[in-house]
Amino acid sequence: MSRMSDTFIHEPVMLDEILSVFADMNDGVYLDATLGGAGHASAVLSAHPGVSLLGIDHDDVALAAASLVLTDAGLGGRATLRRARFDSVSRVVAEEGIGSLAGALFDLGVSSPQFDVAERGFSYRFDAPLDMRMDRSQSISADSVVNGYDEYALADMLRRNADEKFAGRIARAIVTARPIRSTTHLSEVVVSAIPAPARRRGGHPAKRTFQAVRIEVNAELDILPGALRDTIALLAPGACLAVLSYHSGEDRIVKSVMRAAETGNCTCPSHLPCGCGAVRTVERVRVSREATREEQVRNPRSTSARLRVVRKLSVVKATK
Ligand SMILES: C[S@@+](CC[C@H](N)C(=O)[O-])C[C@H]1O[C@@H](n2cnc3c(N)ncnc32)[C@H](O)[C@@H]1O
């Protein structure tokens, strides 16, 4: 009989690098805010017998698969799994009676199975209704965005979420072609809106539009800064936050939140001592930013991965 964990196959990205980040983690609670198929989480738990897991995901299919993986590995007894969006991390941590975190990981975006299950509507590779909800209990879907946003809002979304060069042309084509009910129809409309020479460059021409709609449906960029700030506040002294992002919009946010915590938002000129009272709460941890060539060849999803890590300071230090 096929088990859900056999069909939810997602190779954890930069696993060796993540294990190195948490190599000297103290015993306590480790947060995986994007549990997925528990690939990273089960490896981290196996390496740290004194650590327990708080695993969060807003996708019920991912959580069910993660639960099987952890149980099969004999790690279920050390894992608490919660269906939640990661912007409710503070509430979930408080409800579980956890004081502080020994470490935390965000591995952003979509898992391979979410892309590969046709009816979830994430991919232009399969014909499916326009869905793209990671949390299938929410009402906003790709259909509501594609058929509900006006032309200006669509163009703005395409630029904001995917740096799409042809945002205006694509938005106009979408509005003209509505109603658009399927992934195939959306993909055809986008392809027809892009000039022929540009269609032949840089992968599938609809890739960026699908990414932009997915990010919009799941409010991925809106909730990220607050979730990262809340998690930094919850880290125990010496604990690390690691974030894997997969496109420039995400990475910009991660960099800016980490930089703000690292500098305490100090506004003083760099050649003068700090007089603005800013306090820094983390230090940057130097790590390989990208997957190795060998991993990129083995797992194409790792090609766009960017890793950033900060460590909570034991004593909050003045900025300079
Ligand atoms: C790239 S996968 C994580 C894979 C995981 N690290 C592993 O090794 O199996 C990202 C997961 O995060 C979840 N996710 C994305 N955004 C989320 C959010 N805002 N709140 C909670 N879960 C989220 C997705 O449903 C997906 O299962």
Image (tube, rainbow, N blue to C red):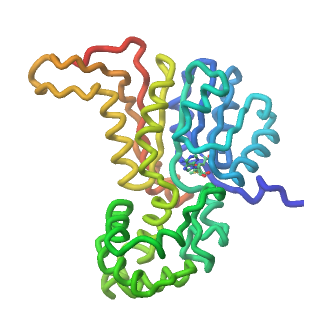
| Residue 174 visible to the viewer | yes
Identify the residue at horizontal 51%, vertical 48% (top origin). Answer: 108
Identify the residue at horizontal 82%, vertical 41% (top origin). Answer: 72
Q: Which quarter of the figure has residue 256?
A: top left
Q: How many marks?
A: 0
* Residue that protrudes farthest toward the right in the picture: 1
Front position in the image: 313 or 305: 313
Indicate whether 99 appears above or below 76: above
Q: Which quarter of the figure has residue 255?
A: top left
Please state, as top left, top right, bottom left or bottom right, where the C terminus lies in the image. top left
Please state, as top left, top right, bottom left or bottom right, where the N terminus lies in the image. bottom right
Q: Locate residue 65, reporting x and y percent.
A: 74, 50
Identify the residue at horizontal 37%, vertical 73% (top origin). Answer: 150
Q: Is residue 222 left or right of residue 8?
A: left
Indicate whether 166 appears above or below 88: below
Q: Locate residue 218, reporting x and y percent.
A: 52, 56
| Residue 288 visible to the viewer | no
Indicate whether 8 appears above or below 90: below
* Residue that protrudes farthest toward the top in the picture: 315
Q: Locate residue 173, reporting x and y percent.
A: 38, 84
Indicate whether 162 appears above or below 17: below
Front position in the image: 131 or 109: 131
Q: Is residue 167 left or right of residue 57?
A: left
Q: Is residue 146 left or right of residue 136?
A: left
Q: Locate residue 128, reporting x and y percent.
A: 63, 77
Front position in the image: 21 or 204: 204
Identify the residue at horizontal 34%, vertical 75% (top origin). Answer: 151
Q: Is residue 59 left or right of residue 311?
A: right
